[in-house]
Amino acid sequence: MSGNAKLRRSVMFQAVLLVVLMLALSNAPVGDAIWLNVPPTGTKCVSEEIQSNVVVLSDYVVVADDHGHVPTISAKVTSPYGNNLHHKENVTHGQFAFTTQEAGNYLACFWTDSHTRGAGEVSVNIEWKTGIAAKDWESVARKEKIEGVELELRKLEGAVEAIHENLLYLRDREAEMRTTSENTNARVAWFSIMSLGICIVVSGSQIWYLKRYFQKKKLI
């Protein structure tokens, strides 16, 4: 009887753990859907800070206006160092995918083409996926012949790894910013000491000069 009770508790614990994992996975972010209103003149941009060696996948599409007309736009994506990663002109939709080579802000900019300007704002729908959200899990499932719970566990494992890598990246950034802050504080301290020393020297020189001047004039 005791053995059956332990077995039931073990099965119930595993079932609860599986439900918790499934809920965590279902609540995990799968990508960002962004709506942009591109003005008739000028450029509208979106950016995201991404670490290196991360897969980025994005689709964008122009939404038809009230009259059913679909205007064309131009799109350009650049890396933190200004490298051109994607550039298309006179398009109503597009896709770009790349693996980041350096950490920093990746910028995607959109603007209306010259022959469509003057027609008002253009709405653009952007689906931006990075890291684990950009992975093709259907191909993984077919390649490794996994499905169901095992596939969901693999997704959760990938999400945990992505979170761990992001935490390491944030830790490195925090250490870098702390080092920069400490160096800046040290420079400010030395500058303050030098400024104080210069003020003391200048004040002493002025006192000495005034004393000599008054002595020559026999005022003291």
Image: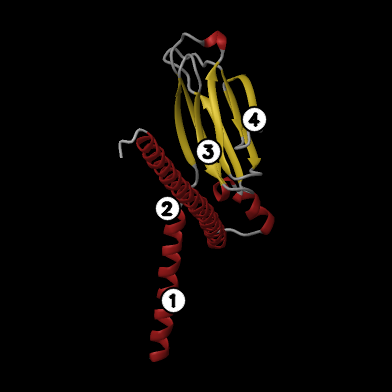
Rounded to the nearest angstrom, the CA distance separating label 3 from label 1 is 40 Å
Q: Counting residues from the N terminus, which is met first, the one under dot 4 or under dot 2?
A: 2
Q: Label 1 belongs to which residue?
A: 11
What distance separates the C-alpha of mark 4 from that of mark 2? 31 Å
* Closer to us: 33 or 70: 33
**Residue that appears at 40% across and 39% down:** 212
Mark 1 belongs to which amino acid?
Answer: Val
Q: Which residue is mark 4?
A: 86
Name the N-terminal-most of marks 4 and 1: 1
Check disc 1: other Cα within 10 Å, few if <14, some if 14-19, many if 20+. few
Per the image, the residue denoted by label 2 is: 27
Work out whether 187 lies above or below 37: below
From the image, tell me which residue sits under label 3: 128
- Whether 21 is drawn above or below 213: the answer is below
Q: Earlier in the sequence, mark 3 or mark 2?
A: 2
Q: Position of residue 23 (x, y in %)?
A: 42, 58
Tag 3 and tag 4, C-beta contact below 8 Å: no
Q: Amino acid at mark 4?
A: His
Q: Which of the two marks, 3 or 2, is nearer to us in this view?
A: 3
For disc 4, the neighbor class at 10 Å (few under 14, some 14 to 19, many from 20) is some
Q: Are marks 1 and 2 in contact (CB under 8 Å)?
A: no
Residue lying at the far left of the rendered structure: 219
Q: Is residue 152 above or below residue 134?
A: below
Residue at horizontal 66%, vertical 31%?
Answer: 84
Name the amino acid, label 2.
Asn
> What is the distance, in whole Å, between disc 1 and disc 2 at their CAs?
24 Å
